[in-house]
Amino acid sequence: MANLGRLLLQGFTRSADRAALNDSNGTVTYRGLADMAAAVERALRQAGLNQDEPVLLPVANEARDAAALIGVWLAGGVAVPVARHAPASAIDGVRVATGARLCVTNAADELVGKIADKAPPYRPLLGGAALVVFTSGSTGRPKGVVLSHRAFIGKLEAIDRVLGFTSRTRTLLVLQITFVFGMWVLLLTLLKGGTAWMRAGFEPLGALAALKDQRVSDVAVVPTMLRKFLALDEKLSAPLIASAALERILTGGEPFDRALSARLRDFMPDVGVVDIYGLTETCSSDFFVTADEREAFAGTIGRPGLGVQFRIADDQGRELPAGTAGELHIRTPFVMNGYLDDPELTRGAFADGYFRTGDLARARADGCVELAGRIKDQINRGGAKVSPLELDHLLAQHPAVAAALTAGVPDPIVGERIHALVVPRANAGVDEKELREWVAARIEKFKWPDVYHIGHQLPIGRTGKVDRNALRDQALSAGVRFQA
């Protein structure tokens, strides 16, 4: 039976004395990582872990967290990663949802702790599972996505066919391994015998310094982090960039628009950028725009990766022709087992064997796909449907705007008003009157934002991505009112 832990260990013996991981505590070799994982495996077996039993795994992007992850898999358990510094109520919510009885504490005197008296009943959905990853749902209730060893191993192989990690790969990992993007970057680096520099959080100047000091070849970030790079004082950032060995930026998790791509090219002209689109439910990384496709496919999510098929469908599941916007559906062998303890939600997530992404998109004649927003994010202003993503992209192209985010805010007159938050570029100011005129010259009147907010930064959620709901809540709190 496929097992990520055993697969990783096979390569560890070939790279025994090489540096595997580096964190704030120092460097761990592949031999050391294998020993740490074996200790966790023994502790779980001694605690009576059952096959395919969920194990709570608090993590903070440290080497011991990677060892714990591998140890859980070697012992036959299902890892349930949760941020170590998350609120106690959030951690307890995951514990209750999974029924986890055991927790990897990584304490010096107790590697594994007991957090419940008995194991949860066996769930067939967890058979052969590697992970339960909790991701936010449109209802606000987190969903437990169950991913199998077989699916994740297949996806790692598919990703590597595109990216080609090697033993010379030196990755800076600022993405948390509670999320699939951070997880596959870590695992692929280790599978290929490279070195991952794990950091607990992202601080732009510190990240640039790490790129220089550690001679990092690859860094994985979400576009919001790239905007923070671009906001740095050039006098501080330019020397670090000039002396860095960075070869490639891997970005995904949220839209990577044309304006950001162009500004990043000016900021780091010699660095290749790979834009990646995927979902937790499909083990991430379903579409790619590679570095050499960056110009031709700018503004798209590229073309599907190995084993991925897609269609653009209407509300009835009927495939739409190229150029017509509809929901993006994905069919892949690397899809989730389902949502934990929620068969109804699982059934609703699929149509004719395709996973329903919830993203509005359109296919181009060249096989690329353009995103047009989230179905549930669409703003309904007086009956007219407006994509906030389209407005985000447009506003970000204004020469004085560094970043932009739009949201629909409930309104008693037209249903929803369009609010736009814009962040000025460094040493630049945004004139609202001029911005309104600029927008009016480029899009239809029903799409014009009703309210502009000028801010220092976009609101960021717990995943490090921009948070549209937070903008909506802030606008409601501001209490802007309109007259009929």
Image (cartoon, rainbow, N blue to C red):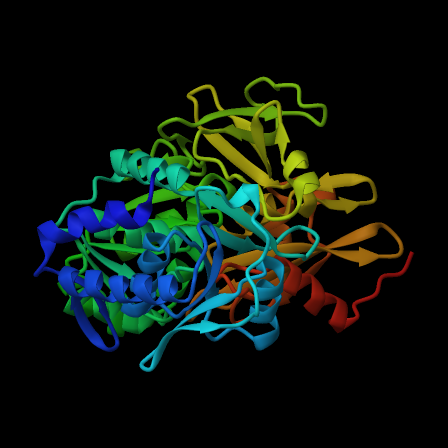
Picture layout, residue 33 above or below residue 367: below
Q: Quadrant of residue 236?
A: bottom left
Between residues 166 and 319, which one lies in front from this camera angle? Answer: 166
- Residue 274 located left or right of residue 193: right
Residue at image location 55% in from the left, 52% down from the top: 395
**x and y percent of residue 119 in the render?**
55, 60
Residue 94, visible in the rendered structure: yes
Picture layout, residue 149 above or below residue 101: above
Q: Quadrant of residue 468?
A: bottom right
Residue at image location 37% in from the left, 61% down from the top: 45
**x and y percent of residue 149 in the render?**
39, 42
Q: Quadrant of residue 421?
A: bottom right
Residue at image location 44% in from the left, 29% down from the top: 333
**x and y percent of residue 57 in the render?**
44, 65
Total numbered labels: 0
Residue 270, visible in the rendered structure: no
Q: Quadrant of the C terminus?
A: bottom right
**x and y percent of residue 448 in the render?**
69, 48
- Residue 56 located left or right of residue 139: left
